[in-house]
Image: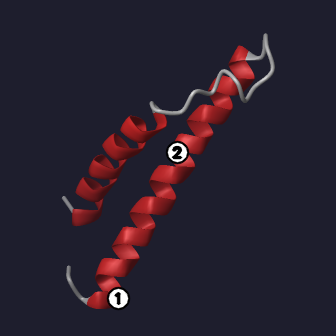
Amino acid sequence: MSGKFFLYCAVTLLVIWSMDAVNINRIFKQNRVIQATIFYFLLGISMIYLVTNFIWDLFTSVKIL
């Protein structure tokens, strides 16, 4: 498997751990649980993608990997 796969796994764990610290109950309206859950999921997926590609591009531009 490629190094990017392992990077995705590591970043996924970090994003889940860091998003656990956010209290999302204050941000969303009451009785909008499904919409809040979908938004939280999409935000997590977006963060995983952006952070992984940033680290991968940084490593490849510096020729570390």
Check the image and report above or below for 54 versus 61.
above
Residue 61 position, x and y percent, is: 35, 88
Q: Residue furthest bottom?
A: 62
Check the image and report above or below for 59 versus 4.
below
Residue 39 position, x and y percent, is: 67, 34
Picture residue at 69% right of the left edge, 25% below the top:
36
Q: Please, which colouring scheme is shown?
A: secondary structure
Q: Quadrant of the N terminus?
A: bottom left
The amino acid on which the numbered mark 1 sits, given as a three-letter code, is Ser
Q: Nearer the viewer, residue 34 or 17?
A: 17
- Around disc 1, counting alpha carbons within 10 Å, would you say few (fewer than 14), some (14 to 19), or many (20 or more)? few
- Around disc 2, counting alpha carbons within 10 Å, would you say few (fewer than 14), some (14 to 19), or many (20 or more)? some
Residue 50 position, x and y percent, is: 50, 61
Per the image, label 1 sits on a secondary structure element best described as helix
Q: Which residue is mark 1?
A: 61
Per the image, label 2 sits on a secondary structure element best described as helix
Q: Residue furthest top?
A: 31
Q: Nearer the viewer, residue 23 or 31?
A: 23
Q: Give yes or no for contact between labels 2 and 1 (Cβ–Cβ under 8 Å).
A: no
Count how many numbered circles sit on residues in the image: 2
Left/right placement of residue 29 relative to residue 10 reads right
Among the 4 quarters of the image, the one containing residue 27: top right
Picture residue at 48% right of the left edge, 56% below the top:
49
Which numbered dot is residue 45?
2
Which numbered dot is residue 10?
none
Residue 23 position, x and y percent, is: 58, 27
The amino acid on which the numbered mark 2 sits, given as a three-letter code, is Ile
